[in-house]
Amino acid sequence: MEVKLLGHNKSLDEQAAALESLLMRNRVFAEIFEKLPDFSLPTAYLGAGFVAQSVWNDLSGFPSLRAVKDVDIVYYDASDLSQEAEAEIERMVRGGLARIPLEIEVKNQARVHLWYEEYFGYPIEPYTSVEAGINSWPTTATAIGIQNRSGKLKVYAPYGLNDLFGFVVRPNKSQITEKIYRNKAARWKAAWPELKIIPW
C-alpha cells in the first residue's frame, strides 16, 4: 500500500498544522483531547505510541485504531511519589474516559525511576520534568506529547516531526537498550510494513 507522506519535509509550522488536522479527524483522539483539561493535571500530555500510530494509520488509509494497544497520558507531580497517588489519578482519568475503547495508561514521570530498574533491568536518574521523560522515549517518532492549552493543541516533539511523517523508526539511545528498540521496531513493522526501521 502506498502511504501519504503528508507533512514530510515541510516546515515546522506546516507539520504542526498537518498534525493537528490529522489528529482531530480521529474521533477517539478528539474526545480524549477535549477531556484532558477536566482532570486538572496542568502538566499532562497525551503522547507516545497512541499519537504516532494514529498518524501512521491515517496516512496509510487504515482504520484509526488499527493495531493501537493503548493510550499514554503522562504528568509530573514530585510532591507525591507514591504508587497509591498515581493509581488514584489513573482511576480518575480512566473513569472520565470510560467510553474510550482502549486501555488507558497514566504515569507520573516524577516517579518512573522508582520502578524502572525492576521493569527494565537497569536504573535511571529521576526525571526533572514531564518533558524530560518524553525526551527519553524509545524512538524519535514516538517521543511526542500533545497538550490541550485552552482548547489549542500544543505539540512537544524534542526530535521534530519529520521521522513521524516520513514513516521512519529511529532509535533514541538516551535511555533504552538495543533489545528494547529491536522488539518495538519489529512489532511496529509487522503492523505498518511501510515503516523504515533505522538499525541500532
Image (tube, rainbow, N blue to C red):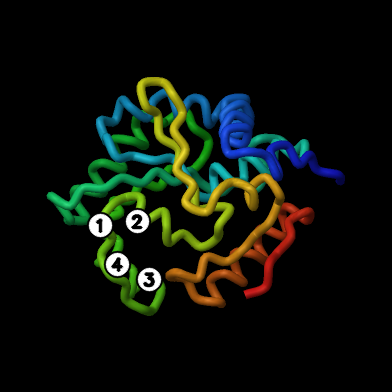
Q: Are marks 3 and 2 in contact (CB under 8 Å)?
A: no
Q: Position of residue 165 (x, y in %)?
A: 67, 45
Q: Are marks 2 and 1 in contact (CB under 8 Å)?
A: yes
Cα–Cα span, label 2 and label 1: 6 Å
Residue under numbered circle 2: 132
User: Which quadrant would residue 4 be assigned to in this image?
Assistant: top right
Residue at disc 2, secondary structure: helix
Q: Label 2 amino acid?
A: Ala
Spatial separation of the CA atoms under disc 4 and disc 1 = 16 Å
Helix, strand or loop at label 4? It is: helix
Left or right of 137? Residue 108 is left
Q: Nearer the viewer, residue 186 or 160?
A: 160
Q: Which residue is mark 4?
A: 115
Confirm or deny contact between disc 3 and disc 1 (CB under 8 A): no
Tag 4: residue type?
Trp
Q: Residue at x 36, y 37 (%)?
A: 94
| Residue displayed at 78% across by 53% down | 194
Which callout, 3 or 1, points at the residue further toward the start of the chain?
3
Sequence-wise first label, 3 or 2: 3
Mark 2 burial class by Cα count in 10 Å: few <14, some 14-19, many 20+: some
Of residues 137 and 64, the one nearer the viewer is 137
Q: Which label number is shown at residue 119?
A: 3
* Amino acid tagged 1: Thr
